[in-house]
Amino acid sequence: MNLQEQRALASLIRSQRWAALATQGPNGPEASWVAYAPEPSFEGFLLHVSTLAAHTRNLLADPRAGLGISAPEQTGEDPQTLARLTIQGTVTALAKDTEAYQEAVRLYQTWLPASAPRFEFSDFLLLRLTPLRVRFVGGFARAYTLDVTSLRAAAQRTN
């Protein structure tokens, strides 16, 4: 993957805040939508979710997840040519009484300022999706599978 493709991948992650979330439900795969905040190094992706939501219960039962991010579709554009990626990984809940949680809250609220009031709700958890692999499609005939090291390199080279 060349530098131009790394920049496109990093730009896509950093330009969006809304993603499809794939989880394993009791009756099979389920998809929903969530806001996310990427850590600067792409070592983790933060999700602030309610325990009332099925996707959160699914993740607490089975921490494997996929996060799908796509460039926005333009009128008249072929959606199959859009840049997109899927991050496969596992989630962990961040304990509220830790410094890591406080830092994650700051990062999340900086990325998504309107989220601040929801941090007062007792049913919300802050989860961290740790990537295992990424599939990036930059457009027609431009598809790559990245490991965690390659994902971090893309984040560092494009910061």
Image (spheres, helix red, strand yellow):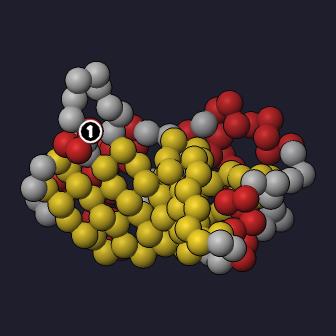
Numbered marks: total = 1
Secondary structure at badge 1 equals helix
Q: For the residue carrying disc 1, how many other residues have a C-alpha within 10 Å: few (<14), some (14-19), or many (20+)?
A: some
The residue most toward the top is 75
Tell me residue 143's x, y (percent).
Answer: 18, 60
**Camera-side residue of 102 and 54:** 54
Tell me residue 59's x, y (percent).
Answer: 67, 69
Residue bearing the label numbered 1: 79
Question: Residue, x 26% and y 38% (percent of image)?
Answer: 79
Q: Is residue 29 left or right of residue 142?
A: right
The residue most toward the right is 122
Name the amino acid type tagged 1: Pro
The residue most toward the front is 27
Question: Residue, x 20% and y 65% (percent of image)?
Answer: 144
Question: Residue, x 79% and y 40% (percent of image)?
Answer: 118
Q: Is residue 97 above or below residue 18?
A: below
**Camera-side residue of 60 and 159:** 60
Is there any visible trace of residue 158 in the rendered image? no
Q: Is residue 146 left or right of residue 95?
A: left
Q: Is residue 48 above or below residue 28?
A: above
Q: In what quadrant of the picture does the N terminus appear?
A: bottom left
Which quadrant of the structure image shows residue 127?
bottom right
Question: Residue, x 17% and y 47% (percent of image)?
Answer: 139
Is there any visible trace of residue 80 in the rendered image? yes
Q: Is residue 76 left or right of residue 4?
A: right
Tell me residue 137's x, y (percent).
Answer: 23, 55
Tell me residue 116's x, y (percent).
Answer: 74, 37
Which quadrant of the structure image shows residue 31?
bottom right
**Camera-side residue of 82 and 91:** 82
